[in-house]
Image (tube, rainbow, N blue to C red):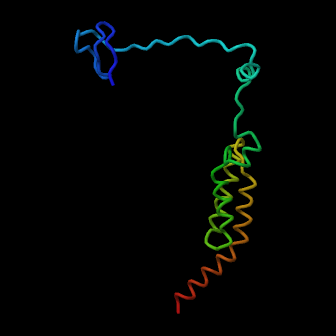
Amino acid sequence: MSFPCPRCGGGVEPQAYLCGHCGADVTVTATFAPRQSPPSTNPYWQQSLNQPQADIGQDPAMRMLLPVGRSMWAIAAGYLGLFSLIGCAAPFAIFCGIMALRDIKQHPQRHGKGRAIFGIVMGVIGLPLFAVLVIGIIGAASR
């Protein structure tokens, strides 16, 4: 796909710097037009210009749906708390929950305290199951 030379009209390849027919410089310089002001009849345009964009992590509904503004430790504690009832995730859920509470205390803008507490509680509930699992493995290995 070629474009016409501005001087002679001959075909010039897009990557060329000079016209192959007349030798004219065909490098393109971009010029930008100033932005036109929006029509004053559109109230939504004015509203979006005047109001700063809200931080998505501060919206409670978005925090329920997406992991925004949360401590990553809290997210890990929540998921590990779910899996702690099958045994091996219980100690990790407790650890991540404690780390999440520390992280939230150090960074007050972060959220996820409920998930951190859930991870700790489920880890404590799953810890006896983990102990039974470990004792069973040790007992089976010693026979």
Q: Position of residue 75 (x, y in %)?
A: 66, 54
Horizontal arrangement in the rendering, residue 143 relative to residue 111 (left or right) = left
When asked about the image quadrant of residue 124, the answer is bottom right
For residue 34, above or below residue 124: above
Q: Residue farthest to the bottom?
A: 143
For residue 134, above or below residue 37: below
Residue at 33% in and 14% down: 4
Q: Position of residue 58 (x, y in %)?
A: 73, 39
Picture quarter with the N terminus: top left
Residue at 57% in and 88% down: 139
Residue at 37% in and 14% down: 28
Horizontal arrangement in the rendering, residue 1 relative to residue 36 (left or right) = left
For residue 77, above or below residue 130: above
The mark tally for this picture is 0
Horizontal arrangement in the rendering, residue 136 relative to residue 114 (left or right) = left
Q: Residue farthest to the top?
A: 7
Q: Position of residue 39 (x, y in %)?
A: 70, 13
Q: Nearer the viewer, residue 7 or 50?
A: 7
Q: Nearer the viewer, residue 22 or 43?
A: 22
Q: Nearer the viewer, residue 115 or 28?
A: 28
When asked about the image quadrant of residue 121, the answer is bottom right
For residue 61, above or below residue 132: above
Residue at 30% in and 6% down: 7
Q: Position of residue 62 (x, y in %)?
A: 72, 44
